[in-house]
Image (spheres, helix red, strand yellow):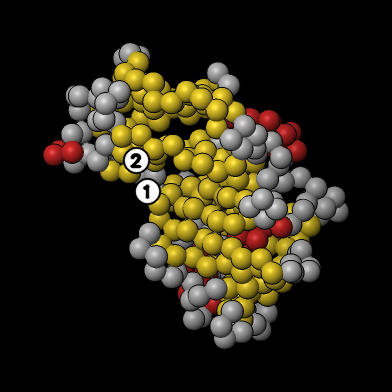
Amino acid sequence: MKPSSWFHRLCVAGVTAFMTISGTVHSGVAPLQLDLYDAADNALMFVKFYYDVEERNIVREVYMSDSTFIRKVLIVYDENGKRSQEISYNFNDDTSFVTTYKHDGTTTGFSVVDQFKIDQVGGMVNYETADPLNFDLKYEKSGASAVKVAYQEDEEGQLERVDVTDDDGALLYYGKFTNAEVAVKQRRKTAGASVPAIVQRRGGALVDVLFNLPIQRTVRCELMAVNGRRVAELFNGEVKAGVSTKRFRLNEAGVPVAASGVYLLIVSLDGVTVSSSKFLYQHIAAGGVR
């Protein structure tokens, strides 16, 4: 697969080589945004980064250069603090792509499949982590090179640029980082309350709430009508640290959703609202939850 074709597939999947591995690069200040360009300086897209209270990148949002939303990527870590999965959601919160990682010493590998489990990047791709600023991404089966990735830091150790080149060193794409210390600190303080809960509509009467919590929290999920009337309390209890999912069926006993219409699903942590998602509910015969 040609480097440009490989990189294009990664972009479509909401992942790029340097977005995928940038979590291993420790800069002075965690970046807020990455703007991506091709070798001819044409703006392609930009990526926003969000962090938890432990300053780990837990969510990315990917946009085209004209600010059209592409997808949100939720990053999952294992018990050792290493990335285990990245799950991409489209504008309708449907799962689009899943990136799975494996770690073996200084070698990290990743694969990307779509919602139908079809491979998107030509199999497992590996890279060495001995040098945190330079990576040679290779296909695991053939050993062939995919692309080379090199980061640049400023005098203070903050990421400022990343280049993606082919085997001959020809520039294919590059990205520029935005680092704003004050804004990052504010983002970090609020990240635990702004991105730990993602609401997903699963079709029919099913709704999932996906949690990514740094510590155990008291969680409350409420279904509200747009006029402010509480329709039902879906959940009220403790949720452990880590990634977990609560699934609710809106037309079952105890969740009296009879009428089609627009509803709000409110999620709060320790009494503080962190998510308010609006969606259209219809009876199954009329198409289910959209």
- The residue at which mark 2 appears reads as 201
Which numbered dot is residue 94? 1
The reply to whether dot 1 and dot 2 touch (C-beta < 8 Å) is yes
Q: Position of residue 124 (x, y in %)?
A: 55, 73
User: In the displayed structure, does residue 159 sit left or right of residue 2?
Assistant: right
Which numbered dot is residue 160? none
Q: Out of 18 and 33, give the one closest to the viewer.
A: 18
Q: Is residue 204 visible?
A: yes
Residue type at mark 2 is Arg
User: In the displayed structure, does residue 282 sit left or right of residue 276?
Assistant: left
Q: Quadrant of residue 165?
A: bottom right
The CA span between labels 1 and 2 is 7 Å
Which residue shows up at 66% across the image and 50% down it?
A: 79
Residue type at mark 1 is Asp
Which residue shows up at 52% across the image and 61% down it?
A: 99
Describe the element under mark 1 as helix, strand or loop. loop
Q: Out of 120 and 155, give the one closest to the viewer.
A: 120
Q: Is residue 189 above or below residue 111?
A: above
The C terminus: image quadrant: top left
Q: Position of residue 202 (x, y in %)?
A: 33, 44
User: In the displayed structure, does residue 91 sit left or right of residue 240?
Assistant: left
Q: Is residue 123 above or below residue 241?
A: below
Q: Out of 54 and 9, give the one closest to the viewer.
A: 54
Mark 2 nearby-residue class (10 Å; few <14, some 14–19, many ≥20): many
Which residue shows up at 53% across the image and 48% down it?
A: 74
Q: Is residue 175 visible?
A: no
Mark closer to the chain start, 1 or 2: 1
Mark 1 nearby-residue class (10 Å; few <14, some 14–19, many ≥20): some
Q: Is residue 252 above or below residue 128?
A: above
Describe the element under mark 2 as helix, strand or loop. strand
Q: Position of residue 109 (x, y in %)?
A: 61, 69
